[in-house]
Image (cartoon, rainbow, N blue to C red):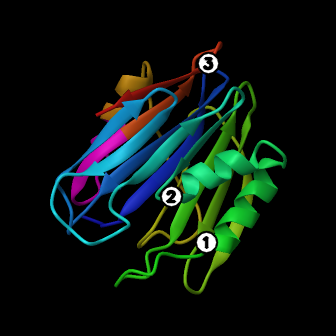
Amino acid sequence: MRYVGRMLGVGLKDGKPFAFYRLNSRSFPDRKAVIKGDEVYIVNLTETENPYVSYPVVKILPDYAVVSNGSHTTFIAQALEWESPKKALIHVLDAMDYERDEYNTPRIAAIIQRDKDWAFLGFAGKDEFWVKRVTLEEGRTFFIATYNVYGIETLSLDFKDEKDLAEKVLRLEFAHPVLAIGVVDGGDKFRIGVK
């Protein structure tokens, strides 16, 4: 079974955008996702000096949802107050670059906008950097990951709501699953489900 590390994806369900995040971990499997208002945090439950294992993972704004695998979540959300999703991803990912851990873990991020059929995905690795706009299609989910996924791959996901999305994502066939988060455009606002 393929190990992809942290992964996130975007898609369209009944004409509305959604996003997900899945944490797979070999080194720190004892973690949980905590919803605090319009944010979700990954909290590590074991002692460590590693600064990268607890972080804000989702930030909901009135029009946008930001999903990422690190502290850049907050900075991307702040940048969206004055610049476009594309520029917010480029500027923040370029400034923060990949994580300086033993694996040189890439920083990945996604932005979806309410009622829109597009999303932006970004990747900042040691030897690779890109930000891409994808046009979302019903029945097709685009995803990126920190390891063993090259560029953008696709899969299909069918779900009822944000909680079901998180559950289905956690069941995807990738190694060492820990938790999953689903973010769905509920019409009036984004809704968050955790599994």
Residues in magenta, as a range: 168-180
Of the residues under marks 2 and 3, which one precedes in the sequence?
2
SS under mark 2: loop
Q: Nearer the viewer, mark 1 or mark 3?
A: 1
Residue 140 visible? The answer is no
Of the residues under marks 2 and 1, which one precedes in the sequence?
2
Q: Which residue is mark 3?
A: 189
Mark 1 residue type = Met
Q: Check if residue 172 falls in the magenta segment.
A: yes
Mark 3 residue type = Lys
Tag of residue 96 = 1
Q: Which residue is mark 2?
A: 71
- Dots 2, 3 in contact, CB < 8 A: no
SS under mark 3: loop
- Pick whichever, 140 or 176, lies toward us: 176
Q: Position of residue 73 (x, y in %)?
A: 56, 51
Instruction: Kindly report the distance in space between the C-alpha atoms of the residues bearing marks 2 and 1.
Output: 9 Å
Which quarter of the picture shows residue 19?
top right
